[in-house]
Amino acid sequence: MFHSRLFYTVLSLLVIAVFSASCSGGGGDISSPDGAINVSVSTKGGSDGASLVYSVTFNGEKIVSDSPLGFVLADGGTIGSGLSLDYTEITEVDNSWQTVCGKSAEVRDHYNTKILVLKSSDGREFSLHLRVYDDAVAFRYALKALDGESNLELAKELTGFRFTGDYNYWGLHFDDYNSSYETDYTESTLSNITPETLTTLPVLVKVSDTAWVGVTEANLTDYAGMYLRGDSTDSNLLSADLSPLPDGIGVCVKGGKGIHTPWRVLMIADNPGRLIESDVVLNLNEPCTFDTSWIKPGKTAWDWWSGPVVEGKNFKGGMDNRTMKHYIDFAGDYGLEYMLIDAGWYGSHTDGDADITTSIPEIDIPGLVAYANERNVDILLWLNWKCVDRQMDEAFPLYEKWGVKGIKVDYMNRDDQEMVNYYHRVAQKTAENHLMLDFHGAYKPTGIRRTYPNLITREGVMGLEYCKWSERTTPAHDCTIPFTRMLAGPIDYTPGGFSNTAKGQFKYQNLGPMTQGTRCHQLGLYVIFESPLQMLVDHPSNYRGADGIEFLRVVPATWDETKVLNGEVGDYITMARKNGDEWYLGSITNWDSRELDIDLDFLTEGDYIAEIYADGGDADANAESVDITTMPVKKGMTLTVKMAPGGGFAARFVPKR
């Protein structure tokens, strides 16, 4: 509930007939470069004025009908009665840029754009910036303060997404804004999203078999994270809801002399796989302006998953140099670029007042860095965000001096404006000190890794760690998040558990944790899940000599091309990714066994040797069973993939030399 001391001014964009006339003749219309997507901005309302609305069509079918735009301000000012409109002509932009790491090496940024500018009689200006891509619609607001106004405060955003029917959707729901985005995705219809339902982004909506929409936001900078709520009078309308500032007075955004919102994004395609391939979230962020040659994607060993004891493996570990060297040795032997030293190296992980510039006596970070470097391995460190907030100015230069290459920051669990600004400060400060960055306990990505490519990955997902205390990370969950959470960007899911269980065999346990589904399901995740920093979650003794470890040795963490070959949300997915002159294929299924014929049309011309990792014939009972074969293949051939319940498939295609 908003604080009673605030006087609310609704900027509902009441526009007189002059505005309506100005919008006629296509003034508010804009289409994608290929013409498939059209956006229309118009007015709707009574004789005393009208509110600004937009609608979207795709391939001639209206998918979003008149949806509201605007703000509720909390500054006590007035807007005035007369708003005039001007707009720029449509401009086509077509550029390309090189990524540092991710799902593609080169990104095309191709869109049509225009700006609608409204000005009130009291001098207040408001503009709506529109971009329409071949696979997305994006818009953002810019609002200027009046002369004499020192600080704009925003209580609410009136943005809505009114779909044209009660369509199926997939989304995450929470009771409040303090969340790490770690829960199960709901599949239901839009009418089941109530005003009381707090729904996070991205949301995937199936309009029809040939029209899919992903709703998210991009370039979340100095603003509050956006959620969606249902509407009590219109079951097809999803309304924006902003994460409030923690002071509790009902203000969501403090904007000084002006406010620029994040981009509100509707990703649109004829099948959900095309949404996964889209780069629109990245494109809506500013380019990087610093040298990135020191940023190195890769795979990392990790001590946290196995805990202090690995039963039956003749090794008792702990937070000490001996244990860390054990993991470093494994990383070096199997060509992993990193070893992540997780919570406990400087003290209690829950202590926000701990000193992150000093390790416990059992840990020698500079010594471990030197030991690792002798084995071509670099060190990453875990940190509590509160400690980082207090000590980043002294800690980050120290880590660079030690030779540490990156940090994992955890436990934020918020996305209000203050926390969003914290993310940007940490990204900037780590970049200044040549540290890569992984956010855990985090909100969804919004593409700022284009601006800060050292922000190499983040969590914001219910990952494999949940196997230690729940049965929630199922094969069906794994087949859902590529179509939902991964639309926003990389996911640090921490895959690779090698204690695999068939259906009915799994039990959660903190020590010696298991995974649900087959060994090949875990292998397939390294192709399916985008993350330029990929964990090998398990204990070294579970990997050494195990079937499938050779695939994990060679599979890259960054890609030149990405293609989604097939899939149904929650059921299965197959993806092909290219790195250099090699292609990799990953496929996973839910608890249904599945046989798929995969056309190898994604391969470039020439002969390849396929290294294939498939579920063994008994994988429905013995989930660790893997059939490893090689065969010659070439473009145009068809590969038959058979997956056990909870199964998977992985392959590497190496050009024949």
Image (spheres, rainbow, N blue to C red):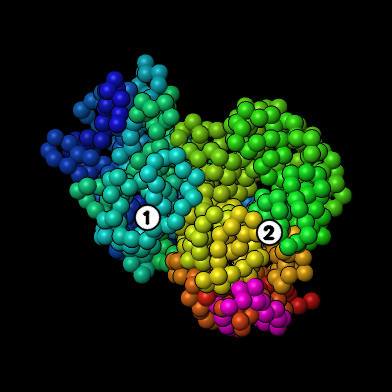
Identify the residue shown where x is 39% and y is 50%: 173
Q: Quadrant of the N terminus?
A: top left
Disc 1: which residue: 31
Q: Nearer the viewer, mark 2 or mark 1?
A: 2
**Is there CB contact under 8 Å for labels 2 and 1?**
no
As drawn, 131 above or below 386 = below
Q: Nearer the viewer, residue 410 or 38?
A: 410
Q: Which kind of residue does numbered mark 2 sit on? A: Asp
Q: Quadrant of residue 155?
A: top left
Residue 107 lies in the magenta stretch: no
Disc 2: which residue: 538
As drawn, 245 above or below 46 = above
Question: Where's residue 66, x and y in %?
Answer: 25, 50
Is residue 415 at all visible to an observer of this figure? Answer: yes
Q: Nearer the viewer, residue 310 or 54?
A: 310
Q: Residue furthest right?
A: 374
Give, as a single range, the part of the protein colored magenta. Answer: 621-644
Image side of residue 382 versus residue 26, left or right: right
Question: Where's residue 593, x and y in %?
Answer: 51, 78
Q: Quadrant of residue 355?
A: top right
Identify the residue shown where x is 75% and y is 50%: 317
Residue 631 lies in the magenta stretch: yes
Ranked by sequence position, the earlier of labels 2 and 1 is: 1
Question: Where's residue 41, x and y in %?
Answer: 29, 47
Element type at mark 1: strand
Is residue 535 at all visible to an observer of this figure? Answer: no
Q: Residue furthest left?
A: 47
Q: Main secondary structure of the magenta part?
A: strand
